[in-house]
Amino acid sequence: MARKSAKATIVVPPTTTPTADDAVESLPLAQGERLVSDVFPGYENAPRHARIYCGIAKPEGAQTGVVTKKDLQYTWSKPNVQLAQQIAAGVASKYWLLDGPPGCGKTEFAYQFAACTGRAITVLECHEGIEADALFSFLEPTTEASSSGFARVEGPITKAMRNGDLLVLDELKGLRPAVQMALYNALDGRPVLIRHTGTLIEPHPEFRVIATVNDVADEKKASFKGAFPLTDPLKSRFAGKKFAAMLADAEIEALRRRVPGMATPVASLLVSIATSIRSEAANGGMREISFRELLVACRLIVSSYGVASDNSESGIAAQMEGVSDSLDMAYGSKESKAITQRVADLARDALALRVR
């Protein structure tokens, strides 16, 4: 029996009745499905009917990408679990473009999605030096008998296609437009011909692609040298998902989980300062501070000012002393002196408000 909601179709065993309070919804999935509560850390209380499609074990000896381990400290939000279900099922699309500011968790989501759903992962760091041919095949030295001493091997895209791995195209805007065009067939689910050998690579049913970009909608904004606008045909081949900074409570909890010994009041203060910076960034005054930079600041505070518990006033006070300097090292010192001073002012004002 299957029931539908406005967002997705829920798969329900005959003995289970879903309610309006269900935490996670699920697409109709085929073989290889597992309970969401068994896959995602922190979702042990998810409804027993909520499932996700997981990768099927590859034949022994298959040359797949890297198999990563689950990060048990990674925070799985409900939207991210639902996105993972969409990607895994491959019903709407097998190819997804994740857009968001640096450090908001796009690439980490891809790694943890692969780890939780049992998929090998191939990560391609996109940059302007990549040639289209090298994505599909390239020459490498060989010890076998060869007139040239080289043998042609499959590139990262064709290998991931053949084995059904998760292919991550990190910072997709690093690829030149001519190289972007070479991806069209692979992102249409069509066989890809390696022209040097005449080999036709059929895409594995489990082949998935996650691409990450910053500011996909603002093509006129030069984010950094070596970034190129995405061609419209390339963008049309992806389903899209916008990533943003986490909500304040979730960001505080994520910092505390990832940095043991970080006091909640101090993590809360850092997030409030980050919120102010992000607000000013929206007006063009500063750039956004990422969760990654907050994480660095927390580690600097704990390593330099000691571990603190939420009920240790002296420990909290010691960590508070390190807020300004740690933020400066993690974020401010990368910018101009004016920005560094602004970060110090925000930290001072936030501390003053806390004392009141």
Image: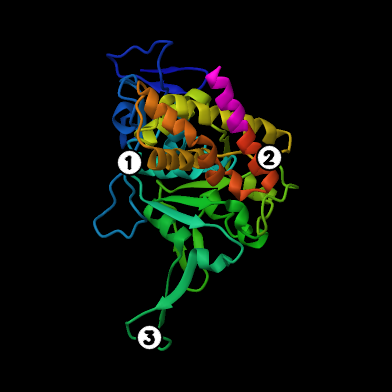
Residue name at image x 36 percent, y 80 percent: 142
- Callout 1 environment at 10 Å: few (<14), some (14 to 19), or many (20+)? some
Image mark for residue 70: 1
Q: Please name the residue that numbered disc 2 is placed on.
A: 286
Query: Marks 2/3: CA distance?
Result: 57 Å
The secondary structure that dominates the magenta segment is helix
Left or right relative to 256: residue 99: right
Q: How are the residues colored?
A: rainbow
Q: Amino acid at mark 1?
A: Lys
Residue 105 in sight from this viewpoint: no
Do labels 2 and 3 touch, CB within 8 Å? no
Residue 192 placed where, x, y %? Answer: 50, 60
Q: Please name the residue that numbered disc 3 is placed on.
A: 146
Q: Is residue 348 above or below residue 227?
A: above
Whichever of labels 2 and 3 marks the residue nearer the N terminus, that label is 3
Query: Marks 1/2: CA distance?
Result: 34 Å
Q: Quadrant of the C terminus?
A: top right
The stretch of residues the image draws in magenta is 346-356
- Callout 2 environment at 10 Å: few (<14), some (14 to 19), or many (20+)? some
- As helix, strand or loop, the secondary structure at mark 3 comes to loop
Residue 156 placed where, x, y %? Answer: 45, 61
Q: Amino acid at mark 3?
A: Ser
